[in-house]
Image (cartoon, rainbow, N blue to C red):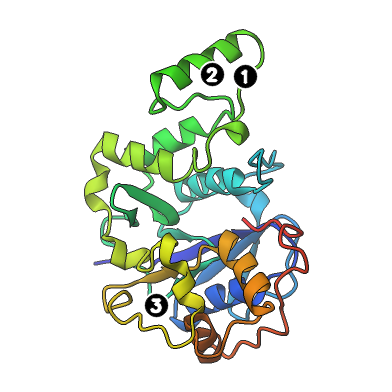
Amino acid sequence: MTPDYQVAALWIGGRLSFLEELCLKSFVDAGQHTVLYTYEGVGNVPDGVELRDGNDILPNPNIVRHGRTGSPALFSDLFRYRLLAKLDNTIWADTDAYCCKPFTTSTGHFHGYEKTDEVNGGVLGLPNDSATLRALIELTSDEYNIPEWLPPETIAEYEAAKDAGKPVSAGDMPWGIWGPQALTHYLKKTGEIAHALPQIALYPIPYKKRGLMTRPGADLSEMITDETFSIHFYGRRMRPRLSERFGGIPRPRSLIGQLLKKHGIDPTKNPLPDRIGAATPA
C-alpha cells in the first residue's frame, strides 16, 4: 500500500509574496499535509500550512550563499537533503512549485527531469536509505568539498587552491553545484536515475519557455496534462519578470493569473518585494 506523503518546504526571506502563497495553498487545496520550515517566523502563511522551526532539521545553521547572486539556494539544498534523511514519508517542494495533484510514490523516489539530461531537485523525494541521498549529505557536509564530476582541470585548480590554504567554497563554484548537478550525478552513479519521472511530471513548462506562464491566453494544454504533478514557476526569474513587465501583478488570463483566481488569492495583498533581491527566498 502506498503511504500518504506530506510535503515540506523552507522559507528564508521575510513575508511570503502571492507567488509562494499560491504554491503552498495549492498543496493544501489538493488535500496534502503541508509543512513550512522557517528560522525567523512568517506571519502570512496560508491556512492549513503547518509551521515548524528549521532548527528541528538543522540547528544553528551557517547559511551558505552563492557568491555572485547572494542566493541561499546552497543552504536550501543542504537543508532538504537532511530533511529527507530525518523524516519519513516526506517529499520536498520549493516554494515556487505549484501542485496540480497530490504527490505520492510507492518507492520513496519522487524526482524528475527538467531537461533531457538533468534532474532538478525543486521537487524531491528520496528514501531514507537512498545511496544518492547519502552521497548528497556527504558532499554538502563541507562547503569546501570538491565535486568529483567537475572537469579534471577544474578539480586540479580547486585542489591547488586548497593546498595553498585558500580552498574554494561551494558559493564560488558554478550555480547548481549542490543542486541539479549533484543530484543528477549521484542518481546516475547509483542507478537510481531509473526512478526519475519524465519532464511533463514536474517541469512541464521548460525554463526557456517560462514566459508562457505570464502570457494571457497561452495554450498550455499540450504541456500540462493528466501526467503533470507540479508546475515549476522558476521563482528567482519569475519574480523580477512579473515586477518589471507587469507591475508585479500577473495578467488575469495568464496561467498564473488564472491559478490565483482558482485558489482565491488576491496578489495585491501580498505583493512581490519592492526590490527584487530585498528578500532572499529559499
Q: Residue furthest top?
A: 164
SS at circle 1: loop
Mark 1 sits on what residue?
Answer: 167
User: Residue 3, can we see it?
Assistant: no
Q: Is 44 in front, or is 211?
A: 211
Q: Position of residue 22 (x, y in %)?
A: 56, 78
N-terminal-most mark, 3 or 1: 3
The location of residue 57, given as percent across then percent down, is 59, 48
Looking at the rendered image, the disc whose residue lies closer to the viewer, 3 or 2, is 2
User: According to the image, label 3 marks what residue?
Assistant: 100
79 is higher (above) or lower (below) than 8: above
Look at mark 2 in the image and give the residue it sits on. Answer: 158
Q: Give coordinates of residue 266: x percent, y percent.
A: 65, 88
Location of the N terminus (image quadrant): bottom left
Instruction: Name the residue type under label 2.
Output: Tyr
**Residue at x-position 71% and y-position 55%:** 39
Asked whether 247 or 69 is in front, the reply is 247
Q: Secondary structure at mark 3?
A: loop
* Picture mark count: 3
The answer to which of marks 3 and 2 sits earlier in the sequence is 3
Checking the image for residue 131, the label placed there is none
Which residue type carries mark 3? Cys
